[in-house]
Image (cartoon, coloured by chain):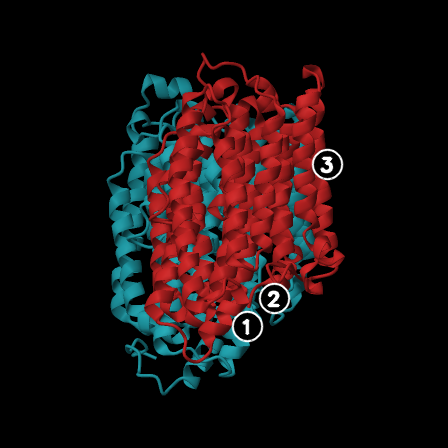
Amino acid sequence: MPDSFMPTSAEYFRILPEIVLTIAGTLIMFLAALLKERQKGILAPITLVGFAAAMAASVAAYTDPGTAFHDMIVVDGFTTFFRVLVMSVGFLAVLASSAYLRRENAEAGEFFALLLFSVTGQSLMAASNELIMIFIGLEISSIASYILAGYLRDDKRNNEAALKYFLLGSFATAFLLYGIAWIYGTTGSANLTEIRRVLAGGGAPSLTLVGGAAALMFVGFGFKISAAPFQVWAPDVYQGAPAPVSAFLSVGPKAAAFAALLRTYLIAFGPVAKDWAPFLWACALATMIIGNFAAIQQSNIKRLLAYSSIAHAGYILVAVTADSEIGSAAAMFYLAAYAFTNFGAFAVVTYVARKREQYTSIDDFAGLAERQPAMAAMLTIFLLSLIGVPLTGGFFGKFYIFKAALDSNLVWLTVLGLLNSAVAAYYYLRVLVVMYMKPAEASAETLPPAGAALTVAVYGSAIATLFLGIFPSFVLNFASKAALK
Amino acid sequence: MTLLDVVLFLPLAGFLLLLFVPKTASRAGALIVSLLIFAVSLGLVGPYWFANPQGYAFSTNISWIESPAIRYHVGIDGLSLWLVLLTTLLTPIAVLVSWKYIDHRAKEFYAFLILLEFGLIGVFVSIDLFLFYVFWEISLVPMYFLIGIWGHERRIYAAVKFFLYTMAGSMLMLAGIIYLYNRAGSFDYVDILSQIQSGRLVLDARAELLLFLAFFASFAIKVPLFPLHTWLPDAHVEAPTAGSVMLASVMLKMGTYGLLRYCLPLFPNAAHQSAPWVAALAITGIIYGALVAMVQPNMKKLVAYSSVSHLGFVVLGIFSFTQQGLDGAVYQMLNHGVSTGALFMLVGYMYERRHSLEIAAYGGVATPAPQLATVFLITTLASVGLPMLNNFVGEYLVLQGTAATNFTWTAFAALGVILSACYMLWLYQRAFFGKASESVTHHMYDLTPREWAAIVPLLALMVWMGTFTQTFIPAISTQNARILQVSRESRIERASIPAPVEVSRAR
């Protein structure tokens, strides 16, 4: 047995965050079985501690960057950025869901364990330097997500969402795996840097084969990021899943999938970037247009946010199309800004929806500004950020993306993308209109103040959104340093 | 920290303060805050009182974001000085006119009004293009709420239309700003200008035209220039009085200010090239606005369309590329702010009494409310350009400047002056003369002291600006001369470009 077969302690240190998350998840499952019903309240705090510890471990792991396990894992700025991002999303998801679960009488350990496992998978995707690892991470994350989407198993909407997500999701992942097999067949490796070397070198394999593999893999990634034409599942799943789960699904898995997509396409397929740029261009534009124009017609807030999140995937694809270092940094920044903004918006939706999610129509937000002005103000911040109004993170995200696009001479994509965001303003404004300018119906049920945890999640997201909008340098500098070249 | 920083950030502080004062104290708080801001802003006149400094006064230039290099670079010059003062003057006035009118959710109302002031001042003092864009967008949000929450029946439609129109325009401007940054490596207006002037940054004709159009679209929507004006009547009619006043007096000036400050010096060739088209649109707007105003049965709509007509003069003056034309345009921006602001206030006063905006609901108002009638008459006369009152000076300068460029333009534009007399005097006749119906006599009480307090500063300004133009013009002229000079120099640099359409025949 060669010495190199035994992983060194430094290598373990580099996957410490995933180890921490897995241990926390397993611990939660044990505790859930052992604890008495009235003691279950401590599960959520333990999960929070788990996420916090994993974040600390991610930062610690970054003090000793490098690869691990035969180049299958890589710890660099890019990895750390996305690890911390998906863990923050997980952290917020716990805060947003604990009261929700209690309200639905569904407070059980497996929810938090699944959340931890899902984030483990996402974190692994961010750290993968190898297609098989990406696939494993994706599966870990997805399978947990499928169950989360159908978590309230007595609810028909939950069941439908989970089934749809599962069937379409596994179908799409199969494409990804098939694409990986092709790539392995043509280049003889699944390692991203190795693939790049082969593609860049003389006697590169036939472009048809590589292109076919890239396209197959894009089906898998496109599904996860809900890019057109693989976006159809998103509205149904986000609408059907429990609101805090939708909040989580709309940002966490998406960020991780983008991390994997960026790494695969910028690193491995970098040498053939010119050839797939037109496809990405069309895909980005189609995603923005489909997302925005479909969102205009929605009357359900969860569905509206689902289509809006499709549109936002389109904006990020613009950054991927730019195929440059600043494009990669812009996508990273945007994902961070979008994560907090969208999560916050869904968290407010969780609050307004109340028991059994009876109130998820846009009209149910009528008079919110008078009934709960603080919550309305927070949702306003999130919506303005989604529109892209200055001093919010969403604005700077858009700004950096379109700047990167113009740097890469994508003038038309920029103009069309910006006009798209003017269209988007219309449906976000509709929510503002209802909240501020329509009185609540006289018969409307009372809206009690939100619980402490949810309030913290909403305010925390709002502060992060504003922070990214007023002091973007902090995150952007890190993103620029960590961006993929 | 300079005085300008204080003037800029006081409204933001005031906004935050108003969020935390008790509901009952909000309007008094807003009045105190806005008066304080006005008092402080008067200090900005200092350097311009005796001398006429070139360049920027009170400038601050510190880094906000390192990469891309976005700087908090603000300053004031002869062009922005009066617009800032107009803003700070009109905000307390807007608070006063809302005193009784706004009775629900008053706290939010005043908070948004002060936030609006923050955005507007920021637009006029930003030197960094990015900062300019930030303020440009910020000012949109409070106005959207002011119209949407406290407006009349169709307020939501009007508010959304207002937001979307402006947003569509500003998106194009954002693309232009980013493109300019990628070429010049800076958002700093002064820096970009010097690069263009010195020939370090050379835009090819197509890029320059597209950039010009991107900026122009955004500004033209805001002005609004025919045929992009359709949001304006809706917004004006539906907005509460204070909203109409701020919208007409200050917000529309953001567009003309942008044209003058950015379109002319940054893209001189494209600006000259497009001048005939722009002038044609401006003249169409002047005449069309006036004709439509004439047939309006609704007072507020009438004043709104008169704005389209008046703003046409401003755009025409700017695109005449003459000193008088530019001076007149800027002066007309201020005049319009004063006199149309006053008209909207007076219409608002009348609405508060009679609860109708239809001209037909009035008639004979002069009998029960002679003071109101007098004030309205002075304002009407100012608006139609009677000599010794403010509008006359601006319109005259614009027409004179335009005549030097193209006399045909002047001839058509002058029609607007005549038409304005028709629709305004006819409005006055129908509303104030004739026999007062019983309901008019019953409802139309005369001006209250609070209403007097709000309108007197504007009446004084109408006379002052119509007689002592020397108070205001020198600062404006200096700045305009510079803009023209920059615009001319940058053009000579690029003489090799295929000659644009000849517009300076008479020069």
Give whichever of B104, A176 is nearer the camera.
Answer: A176
* Res. A49 mark: 3
Q: Earlier in the sequence, mark 2 or mark 1?
A: 2
Say whether residue B132 is visible: yes
Q: Residue furthest top?
A: A443
* Pick the front one: B96 or A83: A83
Quarter of the image where one finds residue A163: top left
Residue A255, percent from left and from top = 53, 48
Which quadrant, please, contains the N terminus of chain B?
bottom right
Front disc: 1 or 3: 3
Indicate whether A307 appears above or below A186: above
* Shade of chain A as shown in the rendered figure: red
Rate crowding at label 1 as few (under 14), some (14 to 19) or many (20 or more) other CA atoms within 10 Å. Answer: some
Furthest toward the front, the residue is: A1
| Horizontal side, residue A113 vs residue B205: left or right | right
Q: At label 2, which amino acid type do we have?
A: Ala
Q: Residue at x 28, y 53 (%)?
A: B227
Q: CA distance from mark 1 to mark 3?
A: 45 Å
Circles 2 and 1: CB atoms closer than 8 Å:
yes
Q: Nearer the viewer, residue B221 or B398?
A: B221
Chain corresponding to cyan in the figure: B
Q: Where is mark 1, residue-wise?
A: B185
Chain of the residue under label 1: B
Q: Amino acid at mark 1?
A: Gly
Label 2 to label 1: alpha-carbon separation: 8 Å
Could you confirm whether marks 3 and 2 are on the same chain?
no
Q: Amino acid at mark 3?
A: Val
Label 1 SS: loop
Quarter of the image with the C terminus of chain B in it: bottom left
Percent x, y of residue A37 = 67, 16
Can you say whether A106 is above or below A197 in the image?
above
In this figure, which residue is indicated by the disc labeled 2? B69
